[in-house]
């Protein structure tokens, strides 16, 4: 099978295992049945902004031209640093967008990716956010009425817990199996300011996530376009937003949003 696509973040549906779909303009292509097949990726030389569509030489903020990067709400500072969100004060690049993305219930959570990490996401983005990060277990820690409040709690907890994933460990499936998420959640109650304690979430349900991976490599290295314009390998799995190949090459699809590639499967 051959196809030309403009890359977008992969769609993922929680299942056993997670079901992945490659998003292109106007279509969604199932990916799970590609696992264990040869896959060739050829960069066409074209990159388009995923917001305005114009052709560019490079992207900013994972898929945007520079003017859009500076103006669209999806690249607001609070996306990466929720404690800086000002939507609750009526300040935003786009208040209509913020009503749907910032002024909604948010969860602060603990996730096991390579090791335990703290994170924040809208309630409607669970478990998709955990899947995007490649987590194999996760638990809700607190529920807040907006992004800003969740960000304040995350800042307090970052004094005790990391907020980053070791992608190399995650993609080689190095699991910290001895970690008890419920135990860490209990400890976290002591680490947050008193005024945030009422947002602590009582449900201790742990979500387990299984990925469509037939085998993990012992070490990994990233495929970066356009540094490498042609690559071919055996696809052995998908986890997070990465395609994993038998030789240890991994390809971050989300980091290449807007790139137009020619794909040959089988």
Image (spheres, rainbow, N blue to C red):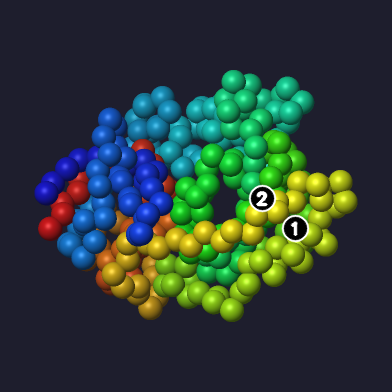
Q: Quadrant of residue 22?
A: top left
**Residue 205 pos. (x, y %):** 59, 59
Say which residue appears at 81% left-offset and 47% top-offset.
Answer: 198
Residue at left 75%, top 58%? 157
Q: What residue is pinned by disc 2?
A: 108
Relative to the observer, which residue lies in front, 85 or 88? 88
Give yes or no for contact between labels 2 and 1 (Cβ–Cβ under 8 Å): yes
In whole angstroms, how far apart are the C-alphas of marks 2 and 1? 10 Å
Q: Is residue 63 left or right of residue 28?
A: right
Task: Decide: is 4 above or below 142.
Answer: above
Q: Which is more N-terminal, label 1 or label 2?
A: 2
Of 259 and 235, the residue lying toward us: 235
Task: Give percent across and percent down for residue 266.
Answer: 12, 58
The image position of residue 228, as x and y in percent, is 30, 56
Number of numbered markers: 2
Q: Is residue 256 visible?
A: no
Q: Identify the element where label 1 is drawn.
A: helix
Does residue 62 show up?
yes
Give me the residue at 69% from left, 45% from top: 143
Judged left or right of residue 136, residue 211 is: left
Q: Vertically, is 97 above or below 258?
A: above
Near mark 2 (Cα within 10 A), the count class, few <14, some 14-19 or many ≥20, is many
Task: Tell me, for residue 157, which label it has, or none.
Answer: 1
Secondary element under disc 2, as helix, strand or loop, is strand
Camera-side residue: 51 or 226? 51
Q: Residue at x 40, y 75 (%)?
A: 219
**Which mark, residue 70?**
none
Residue nearer the viewer, 166 or 151:
151
Q: Position of residue 200 (x, y in %)?
A: 75, 51
């Amino acid at each position: 099978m051959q196809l030309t696509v403009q890359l977008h973040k992969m769609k993922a549906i929680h299942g056993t295992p997670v079901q992945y779909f490659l998003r292109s303009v106007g279509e969604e292509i199932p990916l799970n049945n590609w696992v264990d097949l040869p896959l060739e990726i050829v960069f066409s030389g074209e990159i388009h902004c995923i917001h305005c569509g114009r052709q560019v030489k490079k992207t900013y903020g994972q898929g945007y031209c520079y003017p859009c990067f500076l103006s669209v709400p999806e690249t607001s500072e609070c996306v990466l640093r929720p404690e800086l969100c000002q939507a609750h004060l009526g300040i935003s690049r786009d208040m209509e967008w913020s009503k749907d993305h910032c002024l909604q219930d948010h969860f602060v959570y603990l996730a096991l990716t390579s090791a335990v990490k703290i994170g924040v996401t809208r309630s409607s983005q669970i478990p998709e956010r955990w899947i995007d990060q490649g987590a194999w277990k996760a638990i809700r820690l607190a529920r807040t009425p907006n992004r800003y409040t969740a960000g304040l709690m995350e800042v307090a907890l970052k004094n005790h817990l990391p907020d980053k994933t070791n992608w190399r460990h995650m993609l080689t499936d190095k699991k910290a199996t001895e970690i008890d998420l419920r135990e860490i959640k209990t400890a976290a109650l002591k680490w947050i300011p008193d005024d945030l304690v009422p947002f602590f979430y009582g449900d201790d349900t742990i979500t387990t996530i299984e990925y469509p991976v037939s085998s993990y490599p012992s070490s990994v290295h990233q495929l970066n376009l356009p540094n490498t314009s042609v690559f071919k390998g055996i696809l052995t799995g998908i986890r997070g937003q990465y395609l994993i190949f038998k030789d240890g090459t991994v390809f971050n699809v989300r980091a290449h949003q807007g790139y137009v590639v020619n794909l040959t499967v089988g």
